[in-house]
Amino acid sequence: MDNPINILIDGRNYQVEKGRNLVDAAKENGVYIPTLCHFHNQEHALGTCRICTVNVNGKFTTACTTKVHEGMEIEINTPELIDTRKALIEMLYAEGNHFCPSCEKSGNCDMQNLGYDMGLTVSRFPHVFSDKIVDFNPKRMIMESNRCILCQRCVDEVKTKDGYRVFSFAQRGVKTMVKIDYEQEEKLSEAEAIRAMNICPVGAILVKGMIQELPFGERKYDLSGKNKNVTLKKKYVETLDKGKFIVATTSLAGCFGCHMSLLDIDTDLIDLIDVVEFNKSPLTDIKTFTKQCDIGLVEGGCANSENIHVLKEFRKKCDILVVFGECAIMGGIPAMRNFVPLKECLEEAYIHGLTSEIGANVIPNHEDIPKLLNNVYPCNEIVKVDYFIPGCPPNANHIWKVVKNILMGEEFSITHEEFKYD
Amino acid sequence: MEVIKNTTNRTSLLNVLWDIQKKRRHISSEDMVKIAKEFKMSKMEVEGIVSFYHFFHQSDVGKYTVYLNNAIISKIKNHKEVKEAFEHEVGIKFGHITADKMFGLFETSCIGLSDQETAALINYRAFTNLTSEKVKSIISQLKSGVAIDEIADFPEDNIQYTPSKNKIVFFRNYEPFSSLKKLEDNSPEAIIELVKNAKLSGRGGAFFPTGLKWELCKSQKEPQKYIICNADEGEPGTFKDRVLMNKLPGLLLEGMIMAGYAVGASKGYIYLRAEYSYLKEKLEQTISEFKKQAWLGKNIKANKTFDFEIEIFMGAGAYVCGEETALINSMEGKRGEPTTKEYFPVEKGYLGKPTVVNNVETLCAVPRILEMGVDKYLSIGTKLTPGTKLMSVSGDCKKPGIYEIEWGMKLKDFLKLIEAENPHYILYNGFSGECLSEADLDREISGENLLADHIQFEFNDPIEYARKMRGVGLRSGGSFMVFNKDRDLLQILKNISDFFVEESCGVCVPCRTGNFLLNKKINKVINRHADATDLEQVKEWSNIIKQSSRCGLGKTSTNCLLTAMLKFPEDFEKGLLAESDFNHTFNLENATAEYNAIINEIESTYGQSN
């Protein structure tokens, strides 16, 4: 170290090299500051994603744009800052259209990793679901704006040999997007194109042909999940003095995959029956609530009027409402129709589609058939939701662990491995 | 860093785009391809720049392009009536152009004419105090071929007040070149010392000490330095710079020459906002007058060893360009995005050279200080903020216009002075400022006893706020909008939020999407769909935006909202729903309306063949 100075991070003293970027200086001392737009060997910090927001000498700023100097006092892990950073990730999820289960970059995505890291289950912000462009026109690449977080990495880093920018920001405000220049894109070599894809922290830049044929290589953020079985201990059964807990479940606009997952605890189901009683549920085939329930488990988002009706009824009839699976949390796969006009969806499905009968000209409608909503809505945008269990689908053990802990009134935490589903 | 020879000719990019926009009424894709070739840029980069600026369009905007101000002061005057009149006379809705491409109707944010609203720009000429009759006559005259310059209004200066004669700083008698003559006896160091002693600080509203800024710039080794006058007066409600440039253009040039002399710069630019295009001619005339008399150019009259030139640079409609690093990017022919401030402009500014960016009012103050002498200047105003301040007053008062007041005037006295009518809400320092109430009446307009920036946003209790803030000065950038009790605070805040959604540069997520989401929340409160949790979220989200935004725009975008919630809780709580498990914004009928319409339509198109 040429020029050692002292800085104070969260009350502890560290010796670092003067003028170092705060993210790197902290990292060298084993202190982790989450970043998203910032990456190694970058000449100028971009400062666009704001994830590394910290407090330096009483002022909020980003660590990636801060150079350390003697006596600097830095706060990184205060509850407030941790929450702000989490909020920023949630905001990125809410503004873009991130359907991890169908994304090529899933498992290799910096933003997804941060989501896991921060224990993100649901975004506190309502999903914007704005219609964004997927540009297949470039010769070699695909620009998937739904996933773009406008970090500016590609704009600054990817240039042709003769110095032209390939990616540029266009528009401003919420309409801001990264656009790709076709003429310049053609000039890039295969290796340069792949580099562009790799510096994208999300799955916005893809190279054609690499999507299906070649895997992205080792998944950076995979950890081997431990198969922890949850068995319902006898003592829980003994603590039941008011009789069995009453549980209701339903699947709204989902694929029933989450319900399938529910059954995956196999023989433990038999133990479960000792403590819980199912009321309205596809598992019992009870169609209407017959009593107030302790807990309601809802799979799927709201795509039609019946979903809304059922969800509201669940809210009324269940003391604790738990939604599980991506569709219930953010609309999931069904919400992909939010970018296509409803009329086109219906015509494609019933009139012009490959599977529709030739000469078909009717869209099924009857007063008994639920009406499609203009958009698919996440459950928490319709009713208040108490707990969220992410996953596509969530693992059976995970679901029952949450349910069990809620019912027993126990503190619980889900380990990193347990709720990774990419 | 860009290749320098590339960036140098890019400085003319915005000018070229302006020429095309004015001549062809839009910038077409083919034009962008040509420009890209000329400037050795990718076409998409050009498109990115064109689409950033409000006044550049990619489709035709008509031979006569109307930009009607939709900021709150316009709204509380005749905006609705005038808008309808335009639509009626021209026969199209706003956001469109007529089939014959004669007229295009657009809305824009505050155009710096708050004292004569409702106002609009037509082909960048001002039309003030609009009424439906006036609109009718304007349109019929334009249709009959009358030249626009013949019917355009030239905005009034409306200087309503100056202090007693020996205390006037800005609007005292101006004798051209008189203070410049003193440059001969003063070294650059002496000028900087003078500015420091006068405690002059940035009058745009950031209040960075001007003398220190100049000294930092001067100390840079790089010989090429620049002075930029920030005349991008975009903060809604302020128009003092417009009046200064119209009334005292020479004074501004003198200030710039002095700044150039002090820091050792030989070139100055005035970054003039597009909304003030009508001031350009006057400024140019004044510059050529200065040149003719050798006060500008080589070996200028004031000091034979010193060369100085001034050029005007036209902005193209972006509030964020008032931020100095964004302004510099804009001058370099880029999107007007603020930088991360790795370097300050005084270190690496315009074209990477040390640059001083000063507000119009700051620069105008310098020759006056030299003229009056620092002792006399210091005897006016308060200890930390000596001299006078120009206030731009608009809203519910009898005498909107410009007020040159001595720093230290009490807010209640100022309200009397402007003859405010039942003042209830005050937007102080514009949309990025704060909301004042009667709790602030005893505070003085000055920079005395200021608290750290964040403290005033930490109060939760209005009474505690009033007690703690009583002695704290109200430092002002100059915008003063006053509203009476009958105005709807939520509509005011909604207008502010709309403005920030429109003007966010889009680089960082808290400002870009945070403000957009907050805007929806405000709608929820306005529509009486909100409960207490929503208000909590408004506060929480506002603070997140404040903490984590990249530049001042985002950091201050929620100030008015937060201070209004503290001071006028009743305005938010009325109509608030009881806490509920259901989101009242969701309405099943609305959500299924589209489906019903489609079914109806399809039944009638396909159903007949059955």
Image (tube, rainbow, N blue to C red):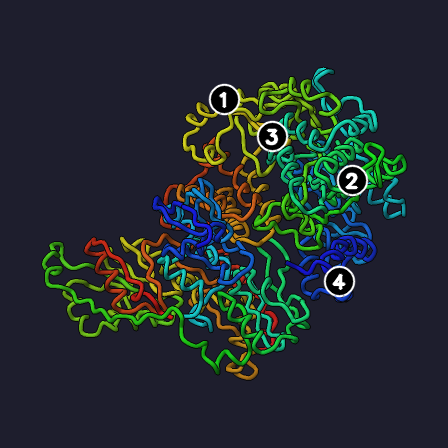
Drawn side of residue B492 relative to residue A75, left or right? right
Q: CA distance from mark 4 to mark 3?
A: 42 Å
Amino acid at dot 4? Phe
Q: Are marks 4 and 1 on the same chain?
A: yes
Q: Is residue B596 toward the left or the right of residue A399 in the image?
A: right
Can you identify the residue that label 2 sits on? B126
Q: Which residue is mark 1?
A: B471
- Image position of B592 (left or right of B99): left
| Quarter the C terminus of chain B occupies | bottom right
- Distance from the alpha carbon under mark 4 to that under mark 2: 33 Å
Please report the residue visible at 79 percent of the width from the left and 29 percent of the height from the top.
B184
Kindly report which numbered mark, 3 or 2, lies closer to the viewer in this rendering: 3
Q: Residues within 10 Å of mark 1 (few under 14, many from 20)?
A: some
Tell me which label, 4 or 1, sits earlier in the chain.
4
Mark before the other along the chain sequence, 4 or 3: 4
Q: Are the numbered discs 3 and 1 placed on the same chain, yes or no?
A: yes
> How many residues crowd mark 2 within 10 Å: few (<14), some (14–19), many (20+)?
many
Q: Position of residue A261 (x, y in %)?
A: 29, 71
> Of label 3 and label 1, which has the lower sequence position?
1
Amino acid at pointer 3: Ser
Query: Could you say which is closer to the camera, residue B203 or residue A301?
Result: B203
Q: Residues within 10 Å of mark 3 (few under 14, many from 20)?
A: many
Using the image, tell me which numbered label, if any, was put on residue A15: none
The mark lying in front, picked from 1 and 2, is 1
Q: Which residue is mark 4?
A: B39
Q: Secondary structure at mark 4?
A: helix
